[in-house]
Amino acid sequence: MCGIWAIFGYGKEVEIQCACCLRIAHRGPDSFRFESIQQVPNCSFGFHRLAIMDAQFGMQPMRIWTIPHLWLMYNGEIYNSELLKKEFDLPYMTKCDGESILHLYAHGGIDFAAKHLDGVFAFVLLDVKEQKVFVGRDLYGVRPCFRTVTPAGVLAVSSEGKGLVDLFQNGPSPKINIEPFPPGVIETYDLTPSGTVTLSSSNRYQEIGQPPIYKTLAVIKEDEDVLSKVRTLLTAAVKKRLMSERRIGCLLSGGLDSSLTAALATKLLREEGAPYNVQTFAIGMPNSTDITAARKVADHIHSEHHEVIFTPEEGIGALDEVIYHLETYDITTIRASVGMYLVSKYINQNTDSVVILSGEGADEVAQGYIYFHKAPSGEEADAESRRLLADLYMYDNLRGDRTTAAHGLELRVPFLDHEFTSFYLSLPEPDRQPTEDSEKYLIRKAFDETDLIPSDILWRPKEAFSDGVSSAKRSWYEILKDHIEEKVSDEQLSGAADEYPFNTPLTKEAYYYRQTFEKYFRGHSAWIPYMWMPKWMEGVTDPSARALKHYKQ
């Protein structure tokens, strides 16, 4: 998890540029570099490094002597870098997986490069010879990226929006059109003699559900059935994400997704002879349902387990920091982020685990949310699943990245593996819908006889992370509502439509989050196009799963 920052066509006030770049310093606590590129007028790169691979030669911007006209800034992991090296005979100069981007571009161009990357990434590639700049992002937007292009042709790119909001004047400005860079897209800019840019093309290099064209680690036998393929592909997805020179840990809520991820990671690392036991981390308030379930899984897989207990007061006290790091005012994202933010803080302060695996993405891929039980048809459920995947970068991926990066950790998400997701989405629509008793039936059934995790955990009903951190008697969302009731007046809420005409807050909780967001990011409410809510549920006014009429007790 690193932080990238770049600007083209703006050579003034370098001290302001550097100050803006330093606002994302939390993403890379190991080292920092800010450099002007002499071959291009008015161009600077800033990089905050979290060293995961090749601590000696992995500093950026990356430039290698065999292709010296190329400069690369990237944040992410390319899991098939070694396979690419063998397939195309790429002459790597470092052990950094991201170096493959430079060689692939030199070999076949930018679209060729993007289509052959098995991983998660956001990058800026400068070609001095061709006078072009390329900006790209992975298919699901697992790694963050923001950009702005001014009317004068100044291009600025940052891992987080906070790195750009104060760039051209003092104080957050609504005049700067800062946008999240779209996932699965490559933009090409032509450089002018002054270093400004003009957009040449914007291409979607990959579609959700489209199979990859690159060679993969997973070995599928012709006679394997669907359940065996699900098991094989998910196992391979976890295995490739164990690429690290730093210690690996796992978030563990005791739900299906995090439990399978932690169990597979623990098993595979033991088989590889890792010099440490995997650390697992659970968080919750007293009497949390997740804490109890996670403890059972940790005992089963024999991990080095850590339990983080927080009080309602500690959770409420973290809200301001959480919203600042998230850069959102979406209700369900904020609720779910508090626990993740606090457990990440604990990991950073008390352990040496740096790379963290989690179960994010499974509910979107495999229709795991409770409201999918109400889908009118398999076709509509499939469309909703794909919509959620397309928008992940503004909701759950945003939560996963920002809460961990805020504390210098790198989050990896096997359920969003390109090969796994494309196979799963290719299965018949009815087969992917929830059964009468269970969501994500195919995934549960695929591991039913493996003893990888306890059977009651494997078939544990879905519970959102924002709910599971609290007790069954009093939910986290109820605690938040009670607290905020005293912070927002009826008069403030009644005037919300005039104050915030876009995504108008409908509750005091929503108003409170919006106020906090505007304090830091005034004028940038379009970063969140809509408030996340379940579909097909009549009369539902709250996104919490505990507010829904559950399909069983």
Image: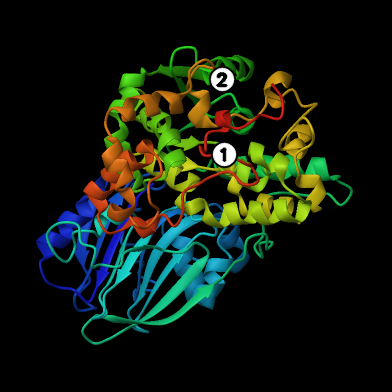
Residue 366: which quarter of the image? Answer: top right
**In the rendered image, the vertical position of residue 495 relative to residue 135, given as above or below:** above
Dot 1: element: loop
Q: How is the image coloured?
A: rainbow
Which comes before the other along the chain, label 2 or label 1? 2
Instruction: Please state the horizontal and vertical placement of residue 249, each as a whole percent of the image.
Output: 48, 30
Q: Is residue 340 visible?
A: yes
In the picture of the structure, the residue carrying the numbered disc 2 is 294
Q: Label 2 is placed on what type of residue?
A: Ala
Dot 2: element: helix
Residue 283: which quarter of the image? Answer: top left
Q: Residue at x 52, y 15 (%)?
A: 473
Residue 168: which quarter of the image? Answer: bottom left
The answer to whether mark 2 and mark 1 are in CB contact below 8 A is: no
- Residue 540's tag is 1
Name the outermost residue toward the bottom.
Answer: 193
Dot 1 crowding, Cα within 10 Å, few <14, some 14–19, many 20+: some
Instruction: Please state the horizontal and vertical placement of residue 189, each as a whole percent of the image.
Output: 37, 79
- Residue 81's tag is none
Quarter containing the C terminus: top right
Distance from Cα at disc 2 to Cα at disc 1: 30 Å
Instruction: Please state the horizontal and vertical placement of residue 133, each as a whole percent of the image.
Output: 36, 76
| Left or right relative to 419: residue 158 | left
Q: Label 1 is placed on what type of residue?
A: Val
Q: Is residue 244 visible?
A: no
